[in-house]
Amino acid sequence: MNWLIIGGIVLAVSVFFAVRALSGGGKPQRTGYQRRDFLFSAEERLFHASLKQAVGGDYEVFGPIRVGDVVSPRGTPPRQDGPREFEDIRDGRFAFVLCDPADLAIACAVRLRERGPAGQPAGSDPLKTICHAAGLPLVGFEAGPVYDEHEIRETIAQAVRKEPLYVTESTGRKEPRISCLDNLDL
């Protein structure tokens, strides 16, 4: 009878270890996925450092951001090829998106362009067209080993510059006026 109990225990322990060995021994099973080591490529990391230095605390820098998360079609577009054109680039990515640090309102989208042959024709750029139609400033920089922070700052400042507010009425354009200078900080 004792041999029967000992044999049962040995059998149970053997089954336990066999099942554990087949299931991976408690370790997570390997799947067809792997984690990326970096969010950005080497060129994008270099540009990100220059971009952060150039914009300082003026903007929060996010990236990469899907185009469809920033721009979407409005109602029924006037052209029939509009939605198809958008569908083609919706899953594309902006390298970086600059947002206002106070409320994270989107201020500007940035993309890095690969270096192309000199004199290459610009051609039509559907992303630029869509961003312009949506009122989203899009700036592009050529990818390279070194970036000029002053040039980055100036290009972004020019792109996000707001045009003056013009209030139109039936009698024509009226300029905004300051009626009280008491609370004006200079």
Image (cartoon, rainbow, N blue to C red):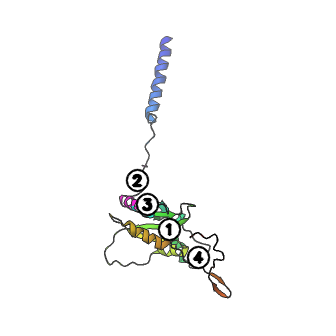
Q: Label 3, label 4: how many angstroms apart (C-alpha)?
A: 36 Å
Position in image of residue 108 (x %, y %): 50, 68
Q: In this view, does 121 lie above or below 98?
A: below
For label 3, count other residues whose C-alpha is less than 10 Å away and answer few (under 14), some (14-19) or many (20+).
some
Residue closer to the observer: 21 or 127: 127
Which residue is the site of mark 3? 52
Query: Which numbered dot is residue 38?
Result: 2
Q: Label 1, label 2: how many angstroms apart (C-alpha)?
A: 23 Å
Which circle's residue, 2 or 3, is located before the other in the chain?
2
Which circle's residue, 3 or 1, is located before the other in the chain?
3
82 magenta-colored: no
Residue closer to the observer: 14 or 83: 83
Position in image of residue 85 (x %, y %): 51, 73
Which residue is the site of mark 4? 77
Type of amino acid under label 1: Cys
Type of amino acid under label 2: Phe
Q: Label 2, label 3: how many angstroms apart (C-alpha)?
A: 17 Å
Q: Label 3, label 1: how many angstroms apart (C-alpha)?
A: 14 Å
What secondary structure is found at the residue carrying circle 3?
helix
Q: Label 4, label 2: how many angstroms apart (C-alpha)?
A: 38 Å
**Mark 2 vs mark 3: in front:** 3
Q: Which segment did they paint magenta?
A: 31-49
Q: Is residue 34 above or below residue 105?
A: above
For label 1, count other residues whose C-alpha is less than 10 Å away and answer few (under 14), some (14-19) or many (20+).
many
Which circle's residue, 4 or 2, is located before the other in the chain?
2
Residue closer to the observer: 79 or 5: 79
Which residue is the site of mark 1? 108
35 magenta-colored: yes
Type of amino acid under label 4: Pro
User: For the view shown, which residue lies furthest in the right direction?
Assistant: 170
Q: In which quarter of the image is residue 169?
A: bottom right
